[in-house]
Amino acid sequence: MSALLTAENLSFRYAGTPVLQDVNVRAEAASMLAVTGPNGSGKSTLLHLLAGVEKPWAGHVSRAPEVRVALLPQRTGDIDALPLTVTECVRIGRFARRRLTRADHAAVHDLMERLEIAHLGRRRLRELSGGQRQRTLLAQTFVQEAEVYLLDEPTAALDTATRGRVHELLTEKVRGGAAVVLASHDREESALAGRAVTLGR
Ligand SMILES: Nc1ncnc2c1ncn2[C@@H]1O[C@H](COP(=O)(O)OP(=O)(O)OP(=O)(O)O)[C@@H](O)[C@H]1O
């Protein structure tokens, strides 16, 4: 199996407090990897390091330059304060890469249909419920044509039917050759992955 992204002997500290110690990750093409561990064990921190949002204190993350990485963070800060509609937010996933074509708009629409947010397209983000907001951010993530998807608790705010849809989308991404790295508390969800990295407290 070819590794699209690898992390070797990663260690990380927040203001001197160790969070991760010697963690190794291989995100392989056409496979799903779960990141598990209790609250505060460093799952989000690990995804941020893999995405390059944080720099490791020791060790390194490597990937080929052509490998595109999409990150769905658990916390998205003040995005709700931006005057964006749902459709605009999903389009950003595509727009970040290039000027949008008709096929791009179709991909945006298809994901919005599949995640049942098409009817919310003109709403502002701050007018959404927690689950509707999560579906919007999932659509924004999945519409990116990435090789590696880093997903932090992607279904925590979702009802059972929508979780099933998200799991179908994950399976499709893997079948299409992507690597999915999924941080989750949910055992059933983690079990979708062939392998797991378990972090201690
Ligand atoms: N910006 C920060 N500054 C200082 N400490 C932080 C910061 N972000 C996280 N931490 C601490 O680092 C540790 C790991 O946090 P992280 O969010 O990575 O854990 P997690 O496994 O994703 O947790 P959860 O399951 O609760 O989402 C925690 O003890 C947390 O308090």
Image: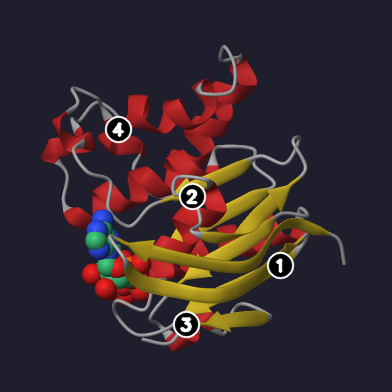
Q: Which residue is mark 4?
A: 86
Q: Is residue 117 left or right of residue 106?
A: left
Q: Which residue is mark 3?
A: 199
Q: CA distance from mark 4 to mark 3?
A: 34 Å
Q: CA distance from mark 2 to mark 1?
A: 18 Å
Say how many tags the image has.
4
> Looking at the image, which residue is at 58% across and 53% down?
149
Q: Secondary structure at mark 4?
A: helix
Q: Earlier in the sequence, mark 3 or mark 1?
A: 1
Q: CA distance from mark 3 to mark 1?
A: 15 Å
**Residue 145, labelled with which disc?**
none
In the image, which is nearer the foreground, mark 4 or mark 1?
A: 1
Amino acid type for the residue under numbered disc 1? Arg
Q: Residues within 10 Å of mark 1 (few under 14, many from 20)?
A: many
Q: Which residue is mark 2?
A: 55
Q: Which residue is mark 1?
A: 26
